[in-house]
Amino acid sequence: MSDTTSRSTGQAPTRMNLRPDLAALVEGIPYLDVRDPQVARATLKELEAQWEPADTSAITVTEQLIPGPEGAPDVVVRVYSPKAPGPHGGLLWIHGGGFVMGSLETEHNQCVWFASQAKCVVVSVQYRLAPEHPFPAGAEDCYAALRWLAAQAGELGVVPGRLGVAGCSAGGALAAAVSLMARDRQGPELALQLLTFPVTDDRMDTPSARRFHDTPVWSTPQSEAMWRHYLGEGHEQRETSPYAAPNRAATLAELPPAHIVTAEYDPLRDEGIRYGQRLLEAGVPVTLHQWSGAFHIFDSFGTATGERSIAELVHAVREHLGD
């Protein structure tokens, strides 16, 4: 891994007690320099080219152009449908990438796994990216995709009452935002919000955000750059919408059940835990798994620990969206 300490505020390197299978990965993880989105995007594409494609024999994969938000361009979605007889649950999948990078390819394998193993129809959305398209463009694209999924449920072989949203990292922020939008706008009813390592708060005032300036995959300097791109320069002096930073919501009541994953050595750890706590306080059912000895998106690298985490997520989708 590139040395991120030199990009931080001069703090001493973080002492980490990682799980052995995750510790073996650290030196090979490149630094995603979110300060320059073009550099970060190129680095991510290089990583994507190295990933082995998942087995799609049990599903069909198609792409469609769907109506975008009012006055905005159409949105591309990729639909993963089980070949097994339906109807099935439907899961809107929102990729991560700090709001500035990522595409339908970034989490293609994850979508294949959930469609194949959880036996649900997965709709992955290519939302607009910052800084070219700052908030609320990406969030509105994702909500448009949810509305399309609900409207096309019959054609897609989806049971309308078994819809969920899922997202990793910035995708987790967008999935939580879509859940808030659906509640506030009397939109589609949701049975699950699956949030892994979610971004939820632009204030970055938690112990993990203050401490982890050099952790693998994601660190506080990357979060700082992410928020500047997504919300614009000087965003600290402006009011932040809860559809950008879900922990800003005045109330989390009447939201769908949540399954939340956080990691010990992740600057986003504490804001994800706090979001889960607030949901519980609001009477929302929550399953929260805080992984010790792990870092941001640790389940994306094909390790035994990562496979355990993915198996739990598949079980959560089956439990909430299954028959």
Image (spheres, rainbow, N blue to C red):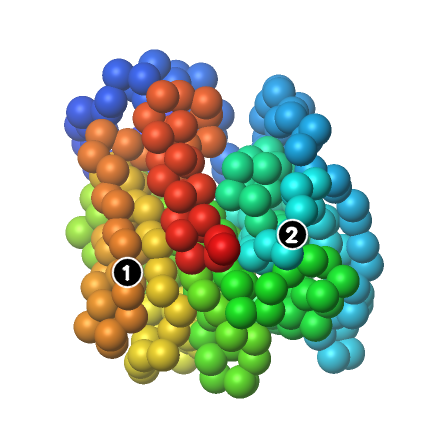
Residue 273 higher or lower than 302, as above or below? below
In this rendered view, identify the residue nearer to me: 311 or 180.
311
Position of the N terminus by quadrant: top left
Q: In the rendered image, is residue 315 in sight?
A: yes
Snapshot quadrant of residue 295: top left
The residue tagged with tag 2: helix, strand or loop? loop
Q: Position of residue 124 (x, y in %)?
A: 64, 51
Residue occupying the point 32% across, 76% down = 252
* Mark 2 closeness class: few <14, some 14–19, many ≥20 residues within 10 Å: some
Q: Position of residue 224 (x, y in %)?
A: 40, 53
Residue under label 2? 86
Inter-mark Cα distance, 1 to 2? 28 Å
Residue occupying the point 47% across, 80% down = 183
Residue occupying the point 64% across, 56% down = 87
* Mark 1 closeness class: few <14, some 14–19, many ≥20 residues within 10 Å: some
On residue 286, the disc is 1
Residue occupying the point 25% across, 38% down = 291
Residue 231 higher or lower than 99, as above or below? below
Q: Position of residue 205 (x, y in %)?
A: 24, 60
Q: In the rendered image, is residue 134 in sight?
A: no
* Mark 1 residue type: Val
In this rendered view, identify the residue nearer to me: 86 or 296.
86
* Nearest to N terminus: mark 1 or mark 2: 2
On residue 88, the disc is none
Snapshot quadrant of residue 71: bottom right
* Mark 2 residue type: Gly
Residue 210 higher or lower than 180, as above or below? above
Snapshot quadrant of residue 155: bottom right
In this rendered view, identify the residue nearer to me: 43 or 295.
295
Residue 320 higher or lower than 251, as above or below? above
